[in-house]
């Protein structure tokens, strides 16, 4: 296919770094994400996540205006914001993160945070939207929380595990990992933990602060964990950083938890760690179900060409799981580079936008990607399986899972069924 | 360049009834206590409905990356729908250091060559305003070269609120587009619809009626709009502002420059729709036109009453509380009353002084802090339904009364006569919905 190189982005796939940061802070208990920029950045992002999760979203803005942009080095609007926030609510943590504008100014957020240290606990992070991506913004918050909050620890508790999920893992997927670890006798602390905050539960939530998540006390003690798990290349270095807080900590990294091989690797490594010979019976049984699912779906998947466009971590995970069961990955279009060998998964991998996807769709039978693919698929008569951010078409996004034996089996069924139903 | 003088003027619009007293949406936003969009979003709302123009956002990832394809402003334009398209120069670190002008020029040249637009709007944003890219120069050059209007929109987010951004967009259209083309014919009853964005097709609920009466919609800003039409807007005979105070400066200036008078109306609910149509024909003062309008509105009202009948049976006398912002604080109240409901209270927390004045005429209780007041009012008055934003859902569940999320992105129109049937159906569905009785029940293990 000929692609016209163009000097602009048309219908962007890429989501911004501050948005990844904001989502990460929403997985910290009683946190107020505070976006340092003009009010629109926070407003756009708030609407984006509110529609995706169907739940109120907490965020505030330092509301930098054309005057403070010139005369203020950041500390004034930040301290004013903290003052106004604490008039109404009492956050355990304020998650301060920057935007393109305040980074262009070169604001000293570390200094501003230092000046306010007696008034409010603040974690700060640099996330300009003229570099990085959704994944890197999320990972930057993990690293900032580790550097700024986690205490150095001399001893480690082997039964405690720190989990660093990547930005594309749904609240329920985080819970699935936590449950899998609990079955092996391990207590898991996810950093951040969306499984209790944005999982869509009915509560007395007014959206003034993040409703639940990992507490700051728990974050401070993460150095005591015997093991840190990282899932997805974008969060790998966070694991190394956490290990610096305690030399006895082990680090296990997984690029993916989707599909048979990835799930096998997960259980092998964890059984080695705990010393168990076998996982619990339900896990053993779910593995057999996945094997059966692979066989039940391989015929349909084997004759299906798939186009994929998700964040690099999720693209890699889903493409791998589907390929394992015979799926042909016709093309992968990414918003930004990932740290994977995508060429092994598909011959046609590129950095692009939705105009590129539109041009590639005729060659595929189904598309896996966000809401923006919906109109394209409808026009081109292709099957659309919704994953990634944003998903405004469906409800229950927070409870999807494509990981470990069970989630992988359900993923294969969903893709195969969608293709079959559309064919008849 | 951001025009400080213009911004000052827009914030102190003489014809705004609030200009002597400050109101929230015109103030500088307060750090840590602000919700709502920025000036860029306001400009986007005002201009994006022009589906035949390219909307190029000169910005890094967030501005358009989070907001493209989110506006439910349908168009009848048969060509490529640019409203649903996100065009972005995708400014990166390198451009911050070396400037993004060349990138912008290349992008505009590409769009002019490949997309055949009727105009190109180029939106300045915070970052590109700060690095000082000379957009005016680039746009002027590209316009000269191509003959297509290339219009710089200077409403970067940090200059202020959404409302201000819409005003700046209106001024831009006035400076660069209106009056740049002469029509072949001048219609005696031609109007411009200003501030009507055709959200969910609101506008299409009443424009066929206007046409039937003999009114011609010359141009719109910007619902289902065309660049060609807005360029000829100076030859319309009347400006009609629809539910949007923000564009009053524009219409005042059009009156000064082109002698076009203006009126301000709303198309929500039966009474307001009839009033709106009558206001337009009365402004022209033509007897025949007025007679025709009376005939059409009477016919539509009768038809509507018939169609509302089944819903009235359910909703007659039901009590409602309304908790929403802006002109919705009274326009929806008026519409609910038209269906036969009693509106006990409405929120004025996010309303302008003007909106409060109007709301007073419709609703007995005005809530200043609805979060504290609405629960009590529900008990006192035996309210049946709460119409509010998502945050109030829990109040409704606790009180076991029906709930309609009025702030949610709606997919169907509540505008004009036909829209009232849609509203009645939605409210009726909510009142009949069992979920509000069951979902809040105590768990078997609760104490």
Image (cartoon, rainbow, N blue to C red):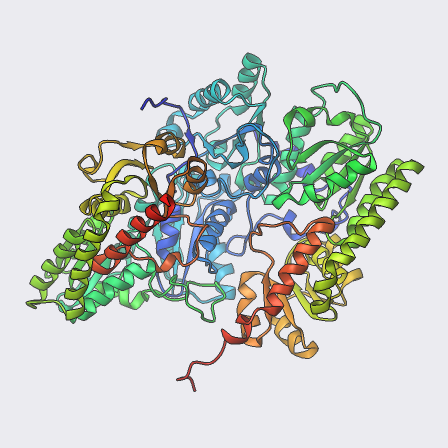
Residue at the image position 38 percent from the left and 66 percent from the top: A212
Looking at the picture, does residue A288 appear above or below residue B280?
A: below
Looking at the rendered image, the quarter that the N terminus of chain A falls into is top left
Residue at the image position 38 percent from the left and 63 percent from the top: A199
Residue B75: which quarter of the image? top right
Residue at the image position 59 percent from the left and 44 percent from the top: B162
Q: Residue B271 in the image: x percent, y percent?
A: 80, 54
Of all residues, the one furthest to the front in this rendering is A424
Total residue callouts: 0
Q: Residue B105 in the image: x percent, y percent?
A: 46, 20
Looking at the rendered image, the quarter that the C terminus of chain A falls into is top left
Q: Nearer the viewer, residue A227 or B379?
A: B379
Q: Residue A148 in the image: x percent, y percent?
A: 28, 56
Q: Residue B20 in the image: x percent, y percent?
A: 75, 49
Q: Nearer the viewer, residue B292 or B282?
A: B292
Left or right placement of residue A108 versus residue B267 in this view: left
Of all residues, the one furthest to the top in this rendering is B145
Q: Nearer the viewer, residue A84 or A15?
A: A15
Looking at the picture, does residue A176 appear above or below residue B73?
A: below
Residue B11: which quarter of the image? top right
Looking at the image, can residue B358 be seen?
Answer: no
Q: Nearer the viewer, residue A400 or B428?
A: B428
């Amino acid at each position: 296919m000929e692609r016209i190189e163009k000097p602009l982005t048309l219908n962007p796939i890429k989501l911004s770094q501050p948005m990844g940061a904001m989502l990460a802070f929403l997985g910290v208990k009683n946190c107020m994400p505070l976006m340092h920029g003009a009010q629109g950045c926070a407003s756009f992002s708030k609407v984006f996540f509110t529609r995706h999760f169907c739940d109120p979203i907490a965020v505030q803005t330092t509301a930098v205006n054309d005057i403070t942009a010139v005369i203020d080095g950041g500390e004034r609007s930040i301290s004013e914001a903290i003052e106004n926030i604490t008039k109404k609510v009492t956050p355990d943590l304020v998650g301060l993160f920057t935007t393109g504008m305040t980074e262009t100014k070169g604001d000293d957020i570390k200094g501003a945070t230092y000046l306010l240290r007696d008034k409010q606990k603040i974690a700060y992070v640099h996330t300009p939207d003229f570099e990085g991506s959704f994944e890197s913004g999320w990972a930057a918050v993990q690293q900032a929380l580790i550097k700024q909050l986690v205490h150095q620890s001399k001893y480690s508790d082997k039964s405690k595990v720190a989990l660093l999920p990547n930005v594309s893992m749904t609240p329920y997927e985080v819970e699935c990992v936590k449950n899998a670890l609990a079955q092996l006798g391990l207590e898991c602390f996810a950093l951040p933990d969306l499984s209790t905050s944005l999982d869509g539960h009915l509560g007395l939530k007014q959206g003034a602060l993040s409703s639940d998540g990992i507490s700051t006390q728990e974050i401070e003690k993460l150095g005591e964990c015997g093991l840190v798990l990282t899932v997805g290349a974008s969060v790998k270095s966070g694991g190394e950083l956490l290990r610096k807080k305690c030399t006895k900590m082990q680090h296990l990294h997984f690029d993916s938890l989707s599909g048979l091989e990835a799930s096998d690797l997960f259980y092998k490594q964890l059984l080695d760690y705990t010393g168990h010979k076998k996982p619990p019976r339900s896990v053993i049984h779910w593995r057999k179900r996945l094997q059966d699912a692979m066989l039940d779906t391989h015929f349909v998947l084997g004759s299906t060409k798939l186009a994929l466009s998700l964040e690099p971590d999720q693209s890699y995970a889903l493409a791998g799981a589907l390929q394992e069961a015979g799926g042909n990955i016709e093309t992968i279009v990414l918003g930004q580079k990932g740290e994977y060998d995508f060429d092994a998964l598909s011959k046609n991998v590129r950095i692009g936008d939705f105009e590129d996807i539109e041009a590639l769709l005729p060659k595929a039978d189904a598309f896996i990607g966000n809401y923006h693919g919906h109109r394209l698929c409808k026009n081109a008569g292709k099957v659309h399986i919704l994953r990634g951010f944003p998903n405004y078409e469906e409800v229950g996004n927070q409870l999807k899972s494509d990981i470990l034996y069970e989630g992988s089996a359900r993923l294969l069924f969903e893709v195969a069924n969608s293709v079959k139903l559309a064919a008849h | 360049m951001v025009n400080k003088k213009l911004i000052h003027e827009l914030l102190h619009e003489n014809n705004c009834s609030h200009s002597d007293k400050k109101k929230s949406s015109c103030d500088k936003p307060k750090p840590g206590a602000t919700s709502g969009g920025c000036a860029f979003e306001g400009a986007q709302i005002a201009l994006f409905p022009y589906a035949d123009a390219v909307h190029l956002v000169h910005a890094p990832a967030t501005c358009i990356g989070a907001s493209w394809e989110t506006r439910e402003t349908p168009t009848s334009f048969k060509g490529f729908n640019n409203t649903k398209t996100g065009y972005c120069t995708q400014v990166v670190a390198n451009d911050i250091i070396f400037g993004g002008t060349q990138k912008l020029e290349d992008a505009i040249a590409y769009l002019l060559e490949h997309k055949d637009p009727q105009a190109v709007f180029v939106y300045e944003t915070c970052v590109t305003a700060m690095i000082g890219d000379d957009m005016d120069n680039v746009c002027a050059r590209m316009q000269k070269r191509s003959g297509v209007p290339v219009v710089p929109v200077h409403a970067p987010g940090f200059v202020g609120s959404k409302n201000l951004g819409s005003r700046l967009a209106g001024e831009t259209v006035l400076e660069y587009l209106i009056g740049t083309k002469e029509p072949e014919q001048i219609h005696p009853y031609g109007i411009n619809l200003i501030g009507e964005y055709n959200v969910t097709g609101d506008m299409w609920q009443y424009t066929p009626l206007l046409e039937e009466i003999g009114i011609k919609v010359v141009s719109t800003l910007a619902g289902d709009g065309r660049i060609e039409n807005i360029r000829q807007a100076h030859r319309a005979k009347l400006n009609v502002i629809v539910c949007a105070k923000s564009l009053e400066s524009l219409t005042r200036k059009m009156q000064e420059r082109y002698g076009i008078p203006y009126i301000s109306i709303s198309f929500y609910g039966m009474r307001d729709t009839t009033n709106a149509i009558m206001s337009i024909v009365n402004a022209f003062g033509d007897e025949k036109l007025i007679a025709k309008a009376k005939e059409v509105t009477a016919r539509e009202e009768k038809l509507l009453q018939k169609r509302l009948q089944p819903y009235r049976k359910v909703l007659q006398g039901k009590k409602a509380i309304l908790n929403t912002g802006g002109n919705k604080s009274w326009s929806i109240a008026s519409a609910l009353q038209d269906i036969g409901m009693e509106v006990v209270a409405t929120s004025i927390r996010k309303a302008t002084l003007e909106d409060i004045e109007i709301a007073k005429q419709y609703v007995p209780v005005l809530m200043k802090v609805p979060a504290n007041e609405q629960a009590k009012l529900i008990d006192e008055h035996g309210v049946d339904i709460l119409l509010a934003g998502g945050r109030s859902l829990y109040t409704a569940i606790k009180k076991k009364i029906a709930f309609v999320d009025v702030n949610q992105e709606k997919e169907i129109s509540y505008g004009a006569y036909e829209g009232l049937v849609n509203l009645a159906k939605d409210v009726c569905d909510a009142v009949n919905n069992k979920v509000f009785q069951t979902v809040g029940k105590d768990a078997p293990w609760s104490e």
